[in-house]
Image (spheres, rainbow, N blue to C red):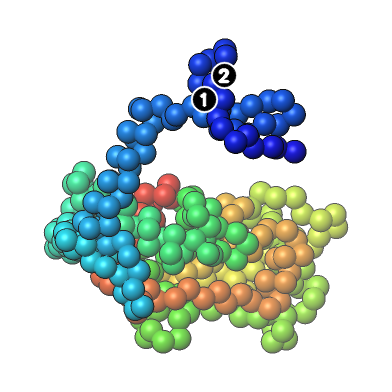
Amino acid sequence: MAEPHDTPRIDAVTGQSTTGHDWDGIQELNTPLPRWWLGIFYATIIWSIGYWVIYPAWPLITDATKGVIGYSSRLEIAADLEAMKQQRASLAKGLSEASLQQIKADPDLFRVAMAQGKAAFGDNCAACHGVGGAGAKGYPNLNDDDWLWGGKLEDIQTTLQHGIRFANDPDTRVSQMPAFGRDKMLDAKQIRAVANHVRELAGLPTEQGADLAGGRTVFADNCASCHGEQGKGSRDLGAPNLTDAISLYGMELDTLVDTISNSRAGVMPAWSQRLDPTTIKALTVYVHALGGGE
């Protein structure tokens, strides 16, 4: 236990006085703090007082002191945002006035469109098509060159503007494949036969014993009017090409049987009802540049 002495002692080794405290024979030296350290300490005190005066620092009941310079991080951010808006406004004006071909040909406009389009894609399209546009079952891959309604800039713009089977847009893209099984237009045997024929068109293996001749007849009587006699599809009708082995829902035999039996009716929003025309342009250029644009 520490026992204070009545008077400080002078340490024989260091020549410093002690504090008068003794711990089991160990005495505490009363060594002063280094002057450089004290100088920094006092400087920070002076600096803090200056900071309190210059900058907002003291909290009040509903606000805080404003400081002599009236600094506010919110005002600074607001000013930066306003400057950014003005800069974007000039760039957006260039996009709004230029055609899609002009945007594609102008390096500066193209760079701006790609940046804006990427942001718009991430906010509105990536949830279905994926961040990179690779799609998923039921959601088109935007990186390949397989397009239902065309992959030119104008085709993509129209699709973005009006959507697909979007009920609230009279100009939406519409294609409708009959539900051949559900509506009793074909029986199960005919559906399986034509499903095998579709795999045959795509160069895929068919099941053993498949009635390919019957499938070709069913196809000619019921499917060729939209998909073409050779199964090449029609962009005017939104009918997919059946010969490239690329399918929105899959080319497995059971999947094809399900599609033929019950049809498909995917929906894409009409983005012109949610995005401004300039953003639609930027998004068009971005989608076109993902890899599958024509």
The answer to whether any part of residue 29 appears in the image is no
Residue 163, labelled with which disc? none
Amino acid marked by disc 2? Asp
The answer to whether any part of residue 239 appears in the image is yes
**Badge 2 density bin: few <14, some 14–19, many ≥20, Cα 10 Å:** some
Tell me the element at label 1.
loop
Residue denoted by label 1 = 17
Quarter of the figure with residue 279: bottom left
Q: Are marks 1 and 2 in contact (CB under 8 Å)?
A: yes
Q: Is residue 146 left or right of residue 160?
A: right
Tell me the element at label 2.
loop
Q: Nearer the viewer, residue 81 or 257?
A: 81
Q: Quadrant of the N terminus?
A: top right
Residue 11, labelled with which disc? 2
Q: Nearer the viewer, residue 195 or 1?
A: 1
Quarter of the figure with residue 260: bottom right
Q: Is residue 260 left or right of residue 226?
A: right
- x then y, percent, for residue 229: 55, 63
Q: Earlier in the sequence, mark 1 or mark 2?
A: 2
Amino acid marked by disc 1? Ser
Who's the residue at 72% across and 80% down the image? 181
Question: Eyeballing the image, is 28 above or below 77?
Answer: above
Q: CA distance from mark 1 to mark 2?
A: 6 Å
Question: Eyeballing the image, is 44 above or below 210?
Answer: above
Q: Is residue 185 left or right of residue 241?
A: right
- x then y, percent, for residue 288: 36, 53
Q: Nearer the viewer, residue 163 or 205?
A: 163
Who's the residue at 44% across and 60% down the image? 122
